């Protein structure tokens, strides 16, 4: 069993920020990440709203955060999946598939997974034309026909990015208005090879060995039609990775997001949550960083009990 003062679950923006502040506060801090450090920010083709960077590739920004975190000697254990939590006692037990950790505090910053449409053909063609990451798979569709599904900022940014590579991009949104930031919506409208399909739902993805077409339903006219495409990029939101916390007694809301107060406290003393896994209404890199910082400083206060800490 390894002893720590602070265990952070997840190495996205929130977890990395918490790691920096945990170590700088003098806590023995370990970050556990089941994938590679960087989080979902690394999947963003472009980030234009993070202070200090007018425009930066998401992967580059994530890597800068990882490098900064390691430079202050935060232990980041990549490819180490947490499998269970025991948060009942004063000493918390975090079990990964490699090691068992005993710690005084825990910050859950496990982020989200891409939400699926749940339609026929989606799982069958994942990795064979169906993708959830424009940066990862966009270059595979150079000069090809692509369908992007969604109406938020992530869908519009993905469509903008892929429009630079593909010959034709269709953006299918089930409503008559996009939910994205106005600046990027205007940029999308200026792309000649992009068409927005309003009030359109994707009902099925078909093909032989790879994606060949999508079945579309116009929920305003009731019309159904087939669209020949080479790839489908699904950008319809995310689902929180809160299952382990919930199983260990951490309260979540109706959508599965961990409930926190303004200081990132959960319902269990010494357990905090930060970033997209929480019920904070704004899911942005900037808010995740702020929540991670707050959670780490609260963990420090819980352990060291400085004069200003009120519990």
Image: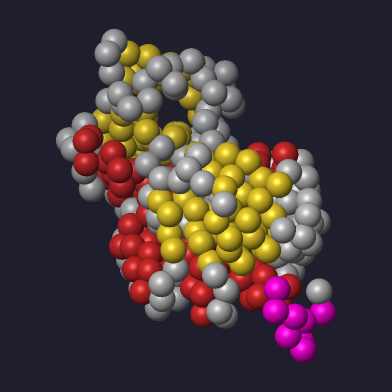
Q: Is residue 260 visible?
A: no
Foreground of the two, 161 or 106: 106
* Residue 19 in view of the camera: yes
Q: Residue at x 21, y 31 (%)?
A: 144
Q: Residue at the far top: name it.
A: 208
| Residue pictured at 27% horizontal, 25% vertical | 230
Quadrant position of residue 8: bottom right
Seen from this angle, which residue lies furthest front? 1
Judge from the rendering whether residue 242 lies leftward or rightward of residue 254; answer left or right: left
Residue 21 location, x and y as percent?
Answer: 54, 75
The outermost residue toward the left is: 143
Query: What residue is rendered at 68% in x and 63% in y?
Result: 104
Give x and y (percent) for residue 309: 77, 81
The region drawn magenta spans: 303-310
Task: Please give the name of the residue rendered at 30% of the width and 24% of the height, measured from the top-left corner.
Answer: 128
Q: Is residue 306 magenta?
A: yes
Tell me if 310 is positioned left or right of 186 in this view.
Answer: right
203 horizontally vs 129: left or right:
right
The location of residue 188, given as percent across then percent down, is 37, 51
Rendered image quadrant of residue 54? bottom left
């Amino acid at each position: 069993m390894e002893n720590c003062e602070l265990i952070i679950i997840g190495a996205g923006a929130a977890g990395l920020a918490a790691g920096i502040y945990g170590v700088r506060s003098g806590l023995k801090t370990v970050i556990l990440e089941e994938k590679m450090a960087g989080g979902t920010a690394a999947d963003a083709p472009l980030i234009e709203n993070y202070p200090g960077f007018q425009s930066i590739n998401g992967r580059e920004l994530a890597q800068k955060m990882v490098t900064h975190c390691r430079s202050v000697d935060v232990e980041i254990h990549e490819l180490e999946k947490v499998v269970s939590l025991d948060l009942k006692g004063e000493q918390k037990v975090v079990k990964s598939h490699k090691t068992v950790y005993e710690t005084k505090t825990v910050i859950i910053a496990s982020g989200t997974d891409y939400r699926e449409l749940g339609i026929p053909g989606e799982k069958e063609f994942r990795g064979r034309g169906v993708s959830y990451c424009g940066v990862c798979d966009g270059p595979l569709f150079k000069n090809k026909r692509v369908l992007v599904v969604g109406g938020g900022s992530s869908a519009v940014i993905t469509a903008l990015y892929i429009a630079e590579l593909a010959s034709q991009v269709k953006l299918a949104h089930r409503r008559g208005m996009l939910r994205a930031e106005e600046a990027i919506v205007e940029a999308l409208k200026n792309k000649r090879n992009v068409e927005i399909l309003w009030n359109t739902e994707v009902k099925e993805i078909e093909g032989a060995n790879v994606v060949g077409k999508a079945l579309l339903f116009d929920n305003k006219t009731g019309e159904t039609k087939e669209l020949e495409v080479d790839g489908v990029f699904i950008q319809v939101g995310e689902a929180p990775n809160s299952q382990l916390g919930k199983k260990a007694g951490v309260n979540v809301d109706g959508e599965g997001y961990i409930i926190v107060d303004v200081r990132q406290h959960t319902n269990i003393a010494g357990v905090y949550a930060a970033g997209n896994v929480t019920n904070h209404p704004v899911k942005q890199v900037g808010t995740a960083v702020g929540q991670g910082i707050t959670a780490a400083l609260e963990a420090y206060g819980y352990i060291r009990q400085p004069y200003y800490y009120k519990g």
